[in-house]
Image (cartoon, coloured by chain):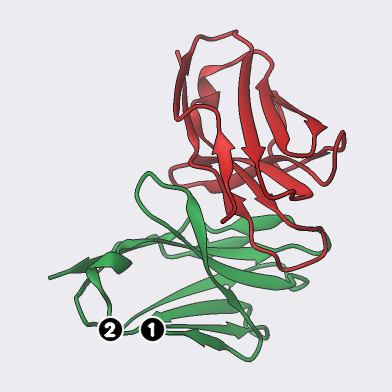
Amino acid sequence: RKEVEQDPGPFNVPEGATVAFNCTYSNSASQSFFWYRQDCRKEPKLLMSVYSSGNEDGRFTAQLNRASQYISLLIRDSKLSDSATYLCVVKRGGGNKLTFGTGTQLKVEL
Amino acid sequence: DVKVTQSSRYLVKRTGEKVFLECVQDMDHENMFWYRQDPGLGLRLIYFSYDVKMKEKGDIPEGYSVSREKKERFSLILESASTNQTSMYLCASSRSVDSNQPQHFGDGTRLSIL
């Protein structure tokens, strides 16, 4: 079983739609969680950290469920510019080693 | 803004060659990382370094080595390149060990081994 699992998609949604991605992780000792965004043929960039109480950044909301070991990302009012691959990332134990999911591809269409 | 610079965007080498990939960061970060990214497999950690002259193996170190002689520079070395090392290589850096500081990535080097 992979340490971090995501549905690869693609998710094709119309502009203005709300879309949600889930991600599951296998290591219950995982400490920190992130969503990164990767545009086609570009490097990954941090989108947002995921906090235990849930957190919001504009149109983006991240949630963490430790009991079920999953993380979610909700995007409201999707824009064409949101089209990208979204990587679920988990920090393992001490240090700064991250485990990346393979990503979920989002395509926002007119 | 953090700047992580990888020496080449595209590189073509032959089987058996020794290949050097260079990475430089300008933010005085302690941590530096080398990943490779392949379709369906995501990013996988090859090696990382928490300090000058310090290195630790990641998940897939076989066939690779690294060098960190200066804080700002982290080199990945393919000792004898093989076709299964054709991949996108990404360098990253972050501020300190036990924190939630994000990793900042370079643009990547797309390496083809013929």
The answer for how far apart the CA atoms under marks 1 and 2 are is 7 Å
The subunit letter for the residue under badge 1 reads A
Residue B93 in the image: state x and y as whole percent: 67, 49
- Answer whether residue A9 is visible to the viewer in this image: no
Q: Residue at x 28, y 66 (%)?
A: A81
The numbered mark at residue A77 is: 2
Q: Residue at x 70, y 26 (%)?
A: B64
Image quarter of residue A37: bottom left
Identify residue type, mark 1: Arg
The subunit letter for the residue under badge 2 reads A
Above or below, comparing residue B58 to residue B77 in the picture = below
User: What hue does chain A carry in this figure?
Assistant: green
Going by the picture, which residue comes out furthest to the bottom?
Answer: A53
Chain ID, red in image? B
Q: Secondary structure at mark 1?
A: loop
Residue A109 shown left or right of residue A69 in the figure: left
Query: Residue tagged by mark 1?
Result: A59
Identify residue type, mark 2: Asp
